[in-house]
Image (tube, rainbow, N blue to C red):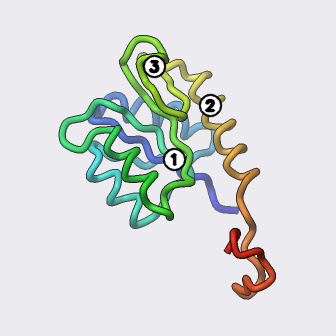
Amino acid sequence: MMRTTILVVDDDESERILLESILSPVGYTVTSAANGADALERMYAAPPDLVVLDLLMPGIGGWDVLRAMRGRRELSAIPVIVLTAFGGGEDVPHDDPVIHKPVDADLLRELVATRLAHARAFQVPEPPNGQRSHLPRAVR
């Protein structure tokens, strides 16, 4: 069985190391990107199962990464957990769950598990031999 891959995107190296130290011991493969451009490049090459995304980064920030992901069919279904130093959740208007810095390790692990389970519950399995003709057009 393949391990679940999580892409951590944060311009702060110590934050990336912390997040990896929280997620790796519970069985996730964690890769990281220091900026939005690198994150998108990695996602296009090998889409992760989930992204933990900092909002405030120089250059291509988290908001831009979210827009790019939602605008690409192959990336739009990847679950995202937003990481932010903003105050309350009302300051971050979108549909993805938010975790605030400093990161609560238990909360992060719980959110990751919940988002992955939710995403997997809605995946449409690939038919054998790549045949899709029996699937409704909306699913193909």
Residue type at tag 1: Ile
Residue type at tag 2: Leu
The disc at residue 55 is none
Q: Which residue is mark 1?
A: 6
The residue sitting at 43% across, 49% down in the picture is 31
On screen, residue 27 versus residue 85, left or right, reads right
Label 3 residue SS? strand
Q: Are marks 1 and 2 in contact (CB under 8 Å)?
A: no
On screen, residue 42 versus residue 74, left or right, reads left
**On screen, 83 above or below 76?**
above
On the image, the x and y values in percent for residue 54 come to 37, 33
Q: Nearer the viewer, residue 119 or 110?
A: 119
Quick one: label 3 or label 2, which is nearer the N terminus? 3
Label 2: how many Cα within 10 Å (few below 14, some 14–19, many 20+): some
The residue sitting at 71% across, 59% down in the picture is 123
Quarter-of-image position of residue 40: bottom left
On screen, residue 2 versus residue 69, left or right, reads right
Label 2 residue SS? helix
Quarter-of-image position of residue 84: top left
Q: CA distance from mark 3 to mark 2?
A: 12 Å
Q: CA distance from mark 1 to mark 2?
A: 12 Å
Q: Which residue is mark 3?
A: 100
